[in-house]
């Protein structure tokens, strides 16, 4: 069984226990904006056609945990520990606020991998790559000047014949 979570989370909606704010230029915040969570949510929901059984974890949590694991090279257990300790990873996984407990048991990582499967992961990867290509096409093709190059001939080797 699968229930679609509420609307997608924005950076301003995320609550920290110490009344701070997350930085918008953090790598996990940036990556969360690139990934098409709504499209992935629709594909993920189709994997659970029955209304019987336990409710599955949200797609953003499941896929996000797999991305964290692969990107950082963690084991299943270490992935869950890192998620527990890092508010940026909480935001990346779609939590509304930072919670100081394990979000799920490390054994669920096996189910996440089985649920998505190799073909779905490849399809999601292609979606993300296509989005990146579209964003790069929208940027100016001309590189920006980052400074001035100074050339000094006095730094040539002295033993040239």
Image (cartoon, rainbow, N blue to C red):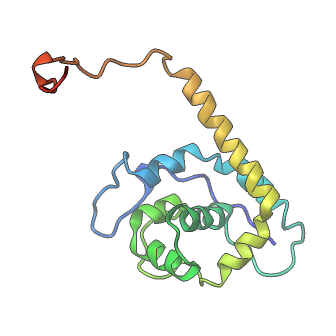
Of the pair 9 and 118, the residue shown nearer to us: 118
Nearest to the observer: residue 159 or residue 150: 159
56 above or below 64? below
- Left/right of residue 23 with respect to residue 160 in the rendered view: right
**In the image shown, does 39 or 63 lie closer to the viewer?**
63
Where, quadrant-wise, is the C terminus in this rendering? top left
The x, y position of residue 9, in whole percent, is 53, 53
Question: Which residue lies at the image location 50% right of the left edge and 79% below the top edge?
Answer: 78
Picture layout, residue 19 above or below residue 9: below
Instruction: Farthest residue to the front: give it.
Output: 161
Image side of residue 143 versus residue 63, left or right: left
| 112 sits to left or right of 30 | right
Picture residue at 64% right of the left edge, 36% below the top: 131
The quadrant in which the N terminus is found is: bottom right
Say above or below: 96 vs 104. Answer: above
Please tell me which residue lies in front, 47 or 54. Answer: 47
User: What's the residue at 9%, 19% (across, down)?
Assistant: 154
**86 on left or right of 69:** left
When the figure is inspected, residue 109 is found, relative to residue 149, above or below; the finding is below
* Image location of residue 109, percent across then percent down: 65, 76
Write the residue at 82% across / 57% down.
Answer: 119
* Corner quadrant of residue 50: bottom right
Q: Position of residue 116 (x, y in %)?
A: 76, 64
Q: In the rendered picture of this protein, how many numbered marks are placed on residues?
A: 0
């Amino acid at each position: 069984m699968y229930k679609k979570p509420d609307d997608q989370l924005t950076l301003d909606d995320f609550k920290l226990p110490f009344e701070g704010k997350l930085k918008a230029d953090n790598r996990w915040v940036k990556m969360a904006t690139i990934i098409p969570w709504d499209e992935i949510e629709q594909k993920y929901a189709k994997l659970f056609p029955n209304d019987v059984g336990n409710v599955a974890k949200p797609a953003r949590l499941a896929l996000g945990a797999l991305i964290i694991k692969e990107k950082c090279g963690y084991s299943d257990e270490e992935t869950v520990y890192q998620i527990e300790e890092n508010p940026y990873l909480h935001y990346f996984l779609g939590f509304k606020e930072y919670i100081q407990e394990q979000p799920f048991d490390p054994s669920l990582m096996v189910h996440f991998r089985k649920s998505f499967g190799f073909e779905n992961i490849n399809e999601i990867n292609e979606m993300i790559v296509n989005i990146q290509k579209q964003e790069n096409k929208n940027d100016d093709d001309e590189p920006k000047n980052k400074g001035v190059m100074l050339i000094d001939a006095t730094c040539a080797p002295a033993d040239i014949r």
